[in-house]
Image (spheres, grey):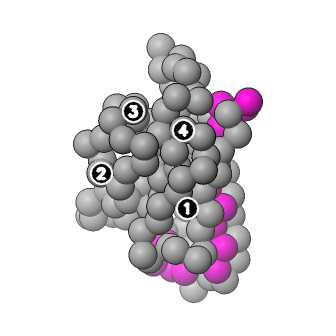
Amino acid sequence: QVQLVESGGGLVQAGGSLRVSCEVSGLTFSTYTMGWFRQAPGEERDFVATISWSGRGTYYAGSVKGRFTISRDNAKNTVYLQMNSLKPEDTAVYYCAAGQRSIYSSDRDDYDYWGQGTQVTVSS
């Protein structure tokens, strides 16, 4: 079956960096658009970043643009989110997602498969 497993979350001080990963199995990874979303307590699950199946197309939420970088390694079936200059407001559970409806997408409804999430906490 399809599995998306996030890892790499943790506690970091404001201004620090963290890289989260998502390893995918059970589907042809190189044909799927991948996305990262995040959800803070009591909030909706919000778009963070997306990358096309080839890796050539990326798109970011305005709140993270210039600080976060999404990338993928199709040989390893893994997508990454490098997070720099972290702020307390970046604290959330981070989820990766896979879909094929668009080349890249910020819409949750365009993703069919989701991971279980990894907690990222940024202290002030």
Q: Which amino acid, by three-letter code, is at mark 3?
A: Gln
Residue 53: percent from left, percent from top: 54, 38
Which mark identifies residue 120? 1
For residue 107, which numbered disc appears in the image?
2
Give the quarter of the image for residue 11: bottom right
Q: Earlier in the sequence, mark 1 or mark 2?
A: 2
- Give the alpha-carbon distance from disc 3 to disc 4, as whole Å: 9 Å
Q: Residue at x 70, y 77 (%)?
A: 16
Q: Is residue 95 above or below residue 77?
A: below
Contact (Cβ within 8 Å) of mark 3 with mark 4: no
Q: Earlier in the sequence, mark 3 or mark 2?
A: 3
Q: Amino acid at mark 4?
A: Trp
**Label 3 secondary element:** loop
- Boundaries of the magenta span: 75-90
Relative image position of residue 106 (x, y in whole percent): 35, 55
* Mark 3–mark 2 distance (CA, rounded to whole Å): 12 Å
User: Mark 4 Cα within 10 Å, few/some/many (few <14, many 20+)?
Assistant: many
Instruction: Give the distance between the C-alpha atoms of the residues marked 2 and 4, in whole angstroms.
Output: 16 Å
Residue displayed at 37% across by 50% down: 105
Q: Say what amino acid the circle numbered 2 marks.
A: Asp
User: Which quadrant does the C terminus fall into?
Assistant: bottom right
Q: Is residue 3 visible?
A: yes
Q: Pick whichever of labels 3 and 4 is earlier in the sequence.
A: 4
State yes or no: residue 79 in magenta.
Answer: yes
Q: Is residue 27 left or right of residue 108?
A: right
Report the mark closest to the observer, 3 or 2.
3
Circle nearer the viewer, 4 or 1: 4
Task: Give the residue pinned by disc 4.
Answer: 53
Q: Is residue 48 above or below residue 27?
A: below
Instruction: Determine which quarter of the picture holds residue 22.
Output: top right
- Disc on the earlier residue, 4 or 1: 4
Crowdedness of circle 1 by 10 Å Cα count: few (<14), some, many (20+)?
many
